[in-house]
Amino acid sequence: MKFIDEVRIDVTAGDGGNGAVSFRREKFIPKGGPDGGDGGRGGSIWVVADRNINTLVEYRFTRHFRARNGEGGRGADCYGRGADDILLRVPVGTVVREEETGDLLADLSEDGQRALVAKGGNGGLGNLHFKTSTNRAPRQSTPGEEGEERRLHMELKVLADVGLLGMPNAGKSTFIRSISAARPKVADYPFTTLHPNLGVVRVDTERSFVVADIPGLIEGAAEGAGLGHQFLRHLARTRLLLHIVDLAPFSPEVDPVREAHAIVEELRKYDVIDQPVDPLAEKPRWLLLNKTDLIDESERAERIAAFIRDFGWTGPVFAISAISGEGCKPLVFAIMDHVDANRAAEHQEPAKLNRLIAADAAAQESGEMDSEQEPKP
């Protein structure tokens, strides 16, 4: 299946049915009065997050979705039938915006979450609503409202706890194969990975995290070099970035320090261009020095120390060999601890906020009671 993570579609909600002008006509009832019913509601269009879908490929060729109009009202107090709504099922993590204004319409981050993107028109009123004591035979009704029409921009941001960064052939796909059951393509040429891959890393029966592997970045990606920045959006929801560096490149002309600086610079350029809510350059980032098995053991420690010194890195560093699994196990446990700590903090924040709000409300109530009890001079 082709991986599609960005589409533009047109949605048109249904119009409401018109209200009817009708009068009751039965034998022996010559002046039965108005009995025109209301028109039915037009169909609305919703987007629904579905965990069983992982790409927007369904909207690659079908670009226009139109809901049915509501039926018009009829005599004998018959109301028009409302039209059925249309449900557009999208992967969990889809962000929906209005194309013209850029306004955010929905951020579907949970399975089953839904949002209204085009509201159907309400049905018109029949003449039975206009009957009064002085207007016993009204001949007016109202037409149905028009449904909303929009052009939507939908983009998928995969839900993952950890994201992988690095140059092409740095070993990202090999690393995710080593620690999870994911099996992305691995080959000895650049840009083997052409779309994001997700892998679930299970530490034990009740502890696991999700890793996202995206195509490699190269210097100048902001200007469109390589695959550009188009896949960096998938790292927006991650809690941790793993910057993988090829410490033993095959070509002597390749400088690992220069390539590592290029990746960091591309993150900054992405933040300037796309202006995400949570800048990627400011996310927690760990350094993974890969392919240490290709370096002689007597030189390994010196090469690692030299890279850290020249790169000017002060954060966490892990020396690993993705293909042999060396150093991967302690790294996985460290990642799991970091993810657990972040999850706990995210659950505590709402509870802490609610406690502060309750305490503030109690303090205000106590202050009002004290002021009421103060004797007047």
Image (cartoon, helix red, strand yellow):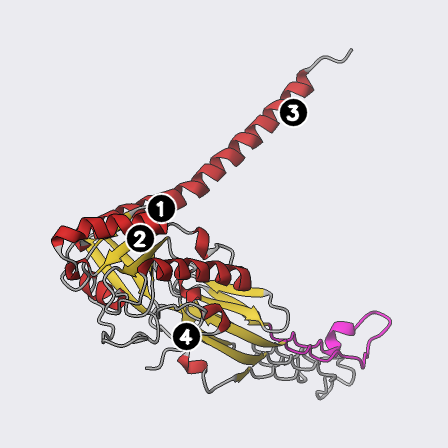
Q: Secondary structure at mark 3?
A: helix
Query: Which amino acid is tagged 3?
Result: Glu
Q: Which mark is residue 294?
A: none
Mark pair 4, 2: CA separation:
23 Å
- Relative to 188, is 299 above or below? above
Q: CA distance from mark 2 to mark 1?
A: 19 Å
Q: Earlier in the sequence, mark 1 or mark 4?
A: 4
Identify residue type, mark 4.
Leu
Relative to residue 374, is residue 244 drawn left or right? left
Q: Nearer the viewer, mark 1 or mark 4?
A: 4
Q: Earlier in the sequence, mark 2 or mark 1?
A: 2
Horizontal and vertical percent position of residue 296: 13, 57
**Residue 166, placed above or below residue 310:** below
Q: How far apart in space, not on screen, are marks 3 and 1 (Cα)?
A: 39 Å
> Residue at 18% of width from left, 59% of height from top?
321
Q: Quadrant of the C terminus?
A: top right
Q: Position of residue 146 (x, y in %)?
A: 67, 78
**Mark 3 — residue?**
368
Left or right of residue 175, residue 225 in this image? right
Report the residue at 63% width, 23% height from top.
Answer: 367
Question: Magenta segment, which residues?
Answer: 119-148
Q: Find numbered disc 1 in the image and state the secondary structure of the residue it sits on.
A: helix
Which residue corresponds to mark 4? 227
In terms of sequence position, does the residue under pointer 3 or pointer 4 come before the other? 4
